Image (cartoon, rainbow, N blue to C red):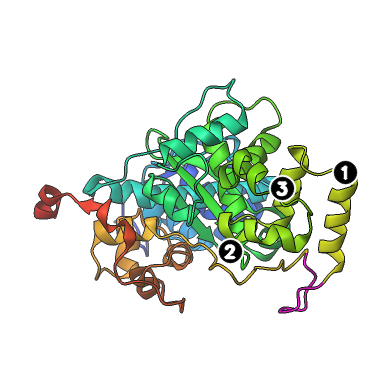
Amino acid sequence: MTTKATPLWGDKPDVEMYGERLRDARLIQRLRSGQVAAEAGVSQSWYSKLEHALSTTVDWQKASDLAQALGFPVQFFTSPPVTAVQRESLLFRAKKSLSKSEEDQLVSWSRLVGDLIHAAEPRLRLPLLRVPRVPAEMTPADAARAVRQSFGFSHDEPIPHLIRTLERGGVYVATIDFDGDLHAKNHDAFSTWIGAMLDRPLVGIRASDSWERTRMSVAHELGHLAMHQTRREGDLEVEAYSFAAELLVPLDVLKREWPKNVTLMSLLPLKKIYGMSLASLIEHGYRNGLLLGGQRTSLYKQLSNRRDPLSGERMRVREPGWRDREVERPKLVATVAEKAFGPNLSIEGIGEKVFSWRTDFLKTLLSGQVTEWAKKVSQVETEDVPSVSPLADVISLDSRLRARA
């Protein structure tokens, strides 16, 4: 009598693996499909079909081999995708030579944020979304004024902390330390919409030690969110820049405060009060007829050739006033996670609740958030932050859901 051999991995049933999960695990690490297929011991063509299918049923051993090749638990690949972000939905500041693989990596990071929010949001009362969807025919300047009004700022009031303003208005912001090439050369920020209904805005920004660049990048992406959610025609980057300049320093303010004798030092008070770089102020003034072309060129040359006395670097790299503000950092993503999952849950426990995302990626995401909880769970050293989040008054755990937890 013959007996059937029992597989070493036991009699575990076949599993359904989702193609989008396979792609995310690969692309967030910027691996090639051939690498993954070879490591898993399968053909590249079969693996490619697996990634492009909605889902495929495979035996447990193949699922385990694929999971090991990608470095994720099997449970990640068997979780139905919930964040419908596509590469075509991303909008960028300073896109330049951003490659397809780099864009795909940002899609995967966006899906990670979306998955975390999807797991957390049902347990929370969140801020009212304040990003208006402006009509297509509205000019960038009018759109900026509409956004200022929606966020509760007057037409000429400085916006002291732009990221916190966005977060109180329901916009998620994530600072992520991307790989060297992507971080240094090709991109400053991106924006998209996440959530099951694509109704939650997300701004992703690269880590930077320049508060001026960070504020302009965030303002630029807010322009995309307000003006370009569905529209793709026209010069979107020029429109977003015009929006950002008007949002930070409205034209009325620019004309009223513009110095008679324009120098880098005479523009510095405007920079300090309204939080816009000297380079952006020069461009804003030129585009609105306050500077002639020769004056603009002369000021840019001064930025390029002169050195900041404090840092010794060229002013184009480190402008005067670079120490006047702290670089803005977000906290809404961490605040939502802490309130939804509890202050004592480990990073491994968070991963289990967030579709088995790998903990090193969750740590990277949370390490860019400035709350004590984020500092603790991501196990990184950051600057001291207040123990009570200013967002606590707009995010509260639903008492009924808390009772059922």
Is label 3 in contact with label 1 (beta carbons under 8 Å)?
Answer: no
- Rendering coords of residue 388 (x, y %): 29, 67
Mark 2 or mark 3: which comes first in sequence?
3
> In this figure, which residue is indicated by the disc labeled 3?
99
User: Quick one: 208 or 357, which is closer to the camera?
Assistant: 208
Measured in 3D between alpha carbons, the distance from the residue under mark 2 to the one under mark 3, in whole angstroms, is 19 Å
Would you name the residue on which mark 2 appears?
207
Residue 111 — which label?
Answer: none
Measured in 3D between alpha carbons, the distance from the residue under mark 1 to the one under mark 2, in whole angstroms, is 33 Å
From the image, state whether disc 2 or disc 3 is nearer to you.
Answer: 2
Image location of residue 9, percent across then percent down: 36, 62
What's the amino acid at mark 2? Ala
Q: Which quarter of the figure is the C terminus placed in?
A: bottom left
Q: Secondary structure at mark 3?
A: loop
Position above or below: 88 against 384: above
Q: Which residues are magenta?
A: 307-315
Structural crowding at the residue carrying mark 1, measured as other residues with C-alpha within 10 Å and reported as few (<14), some (14–19) or many (≥20): few
Q: Residue at x 71, y 48 (%)?
A: 98
Residue 42 appears in the figure: no
Q: Return the residue at label 1.
A: 293
